[in-house]
Image (cartoon, helix red, strand yellow):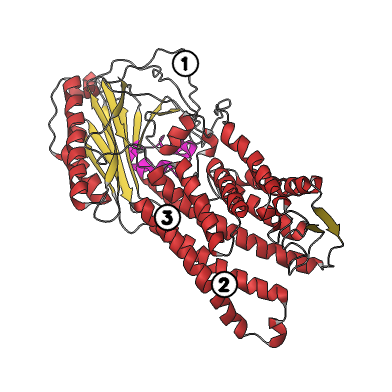
């Protein structure tokens, strides 16, 4: 229902802007002098600001209400912006070339325009194109993707994009087809790039090339800001000869289809990390490469994987779990256990929906990250933690693990039933560490993570149950493109969203010097793993505090919770016999 409400709201916003925008522009123009009202570039600028300004504001408000960011540029915008510009310019040039082959294109002498006027017109075109992309691909598409998935969200956003132009006066079936195809193109660029950078660049270059570079819009003639060239299209509307020009032409449809084909059919290569870099003098933590020849790690009766990853922003796709190196049978009773825990609401949210618990006496540590908004997410995460507050565990490791699984299942059922009664979805992630004897196990649901620092190497013990991880695993995007992706916080699995929940786990032998980290995505979503690795070399209290402080320095748009647990050999004091005589 939320997705339907968002889509209806977006269409209503578009209708309101189309209705009130021109009236706002007329009111603004009414305050200008007769000379100013006679300036065609000024009139077009006022109308553009009056229509697209409110659309931009609506985008930012909608993104804030839905907990996202409409201005996310995505991964490596410096590389994707030129790609978008090339797509836009080449697309219009190809469509115009098809029309020329059909004999529809007629070149005329361009209306002289100064450099200042061309730059002014370019800025107006950029503002309009960027605003549309921020609204449709920065806010609407990622928000719909949370309920319907990326493919459906792209289709719905493209349909809404076409609907806006229908309200603005577009009527030709071919025009509507091209608008929809254009929406698909920009939507795929945004989804593949993890943000709006490429989509804005392509949309701007498309409109700029059509109006400022080639003078194809309006047809015939040129716009208020002039054009570098003046190409008019004559003859059949099928080839662009109508007053809607290329927008209502078959060449435009063929060009868009040609540009869409590689985005739809070509899957990006899976990313594999390069050679392990050294992080520097603070920790000198190194990469742990995946050795697929290592014996597989046996999960605890559930589907589980152990992921050894590079402590940098790039996270490889691992198809098989691997056994930790150097682990031996060491009883936890012979080790000293230190715990450091800290949580913070962050710099953006008003309420902390994270919960955690540390029970050293039974070897159990838990972090939960709630979702569902006020009075929902915080309750869901607290309900999970409540299951562990008075939990007693048997001395048998496997039996104790069964109790932990039962506790998560009990919390899941209660959260689900309450959400059903309230008619509002709520849920939570959970990650739990249990250590007993010489063994440890990590359980998790969602994207809260468990890490292990062992022998100067950072190991990620959990694999996110998220939409973005799903896309990485299937080769839809590369791991390097995952950071900053608008789908990065969309969960594929959580506690409390169904009457049953699938829990993943991984286990191994503990070793002296091991330091574990449990954290919500408020940490790992914004702090590179290299920096996490460096800080885990410190004491648990210091590490947990510094990790939260580092998150705050990175902006902390989400709640953040960390638990650091270190297992070290106790320092033995040797006393000479003469001193005790």
Q: Residue at x 22, y 48 (%)?
A: 419
Q: Secondary structure at mark 1?
A: loop
Is residue 217 shown to the viewer in this render? yes
Q: Residues within 10 Å of mark 2 (few under 14, many from 20)?
A: many
Up/down of 480 relative to 173, above or below:
above
Question: Which is closer to the viewer, label 2 or label 1?
Answer: 2
- Residue 545 left/right relative to 165: left
Residue bearing the label numbered 1: 292
Residue 225, given in percent of the width and then of the height, sits at: 75, 68
Does residue 192 show up magenta in the picture?
no
Is residue 71 shown to the viewer in this render? no
- Which region shows up in magenta? 518-544
Question: Which is closer to the viewer, label 1 or label 3?
Answer: 3
Up/down of 343 relative to 330, above or below:
below
Residue 20, given in percent of the width and then of the height, sits at: 51, 73
- Residue 173 left/right relative to 442: right
Q: Residue 10's image quarter?
A: bottom left
């Amino acid at each position: 229902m939320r997705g339907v409400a968002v889509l209806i709201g977006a269409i209503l916003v578009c209708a309101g802007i189309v209705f009130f925008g021109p009236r706002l522009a007329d009111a603004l123009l009414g305050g200008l002098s007769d000379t100013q009202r006679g300036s065609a570039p000024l009139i077009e600028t006022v109308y553009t600001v009056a229509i697209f300004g409110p659309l931009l504001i609506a985008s930012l408000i909608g993104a804030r209400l839905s907990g996202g960011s409409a201005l996310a540029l995505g991964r490596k915008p410096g590389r994707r912006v030129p790609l978008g510009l090339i797509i836009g310019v080449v697309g219009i040039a190809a469509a115009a070339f098809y029309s020329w082959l059909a004999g529809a294109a007629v070149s005329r002498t361009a209306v002289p325009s100064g450099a200042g006027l061309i730059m002014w017109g370019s800025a107006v075109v950029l503002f309009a194109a960027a605003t549309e992309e921020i609204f449709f691909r920065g806010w609407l598409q990622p928000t719909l993707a949370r309920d319907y998935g990326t493919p459906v969200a792209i289709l719905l956003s493209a349909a809404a994009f076409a609907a806006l132009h229908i309200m603005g006066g577009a009527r030709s079936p071919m025009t509507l087809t091209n608008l929809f195809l254009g929406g698909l193109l920009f939507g795929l660029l945004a989804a593949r790039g993890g943000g709006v950078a490429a989509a804005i660049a392509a949309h701007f270059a498309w409109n700029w090339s059509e109006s400022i570079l080639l003078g194809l819009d309006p047809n015939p003639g040129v716009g208020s800001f002039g054009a570098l060239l003046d190409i008019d299209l004559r003859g059949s509307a099928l080839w662009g000869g109508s007053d809607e020009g290329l927008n209502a032409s078959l060449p435009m449809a063929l060009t868009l289809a040609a540009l869409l084909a590689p985005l739809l059919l070509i899957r990006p290569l899976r990313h594999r990390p390069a050679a392990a870099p050294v992080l520097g003098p603070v920790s000198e933590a190194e990469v742990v490469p995946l050795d697929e020849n290592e014996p597989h790690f046996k999960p605890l009766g559930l589907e589980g994987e152990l992921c050894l990853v590079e402590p940098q922003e790039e996270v490889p796709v691992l198809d098989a779990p691997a056994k930790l190196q150097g682990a031996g049978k060491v009883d936890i009773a012979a080790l000293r256990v230190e715990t450091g825990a800290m949580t913070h609401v962050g710099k953006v949210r008003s309420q902390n929906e994270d919960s955690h618990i540390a029970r050293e006496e039974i070897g159990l540590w838990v972090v939960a990250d709630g979702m569902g908004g006020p009075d929902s997410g915080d309750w869901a995460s607290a309900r999970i933690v409540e299951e562990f507050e008075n939990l007693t565990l048997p001395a048998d490791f496997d039996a104790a693990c069964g109790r932990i699984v039962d506790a998560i299942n009990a919390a899941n059922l209660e959260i689900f039933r309450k959400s059903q009664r309230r008619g509002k979805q709520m849920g939570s992630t959970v990650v739990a560490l249990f250590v007993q004897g010489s063994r440890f196990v990590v359980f998790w649901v969602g994207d809260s993570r468990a890490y292990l620092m062992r022998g100067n190497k950072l190991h990620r013990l959990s694999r996110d149950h998220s939409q973005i991880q799903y896309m990485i695993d299937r080769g839809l995007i590369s791991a390097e493109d995952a950071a900053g992706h608008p789908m990065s916080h969309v969960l594929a699995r959580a506690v409390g969203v169904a009457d049953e929940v699938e829990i993943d786990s991984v286990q191994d032998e503990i070793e002296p010097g091991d330091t574990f980290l449990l954290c919500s995505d408020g940490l790992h979503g914004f702090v590179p793993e290299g920096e996490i690795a460096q800080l885990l070399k410190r004491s648990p209290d210091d590490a947990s505090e510094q990790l939260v402080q580092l998150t705050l320095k990175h902006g902390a748009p989400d709640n953040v919770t960390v638990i650091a647990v270190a297992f070290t050999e106790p320092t033995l004091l040797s006393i000479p016999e003469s001193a005790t005589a």
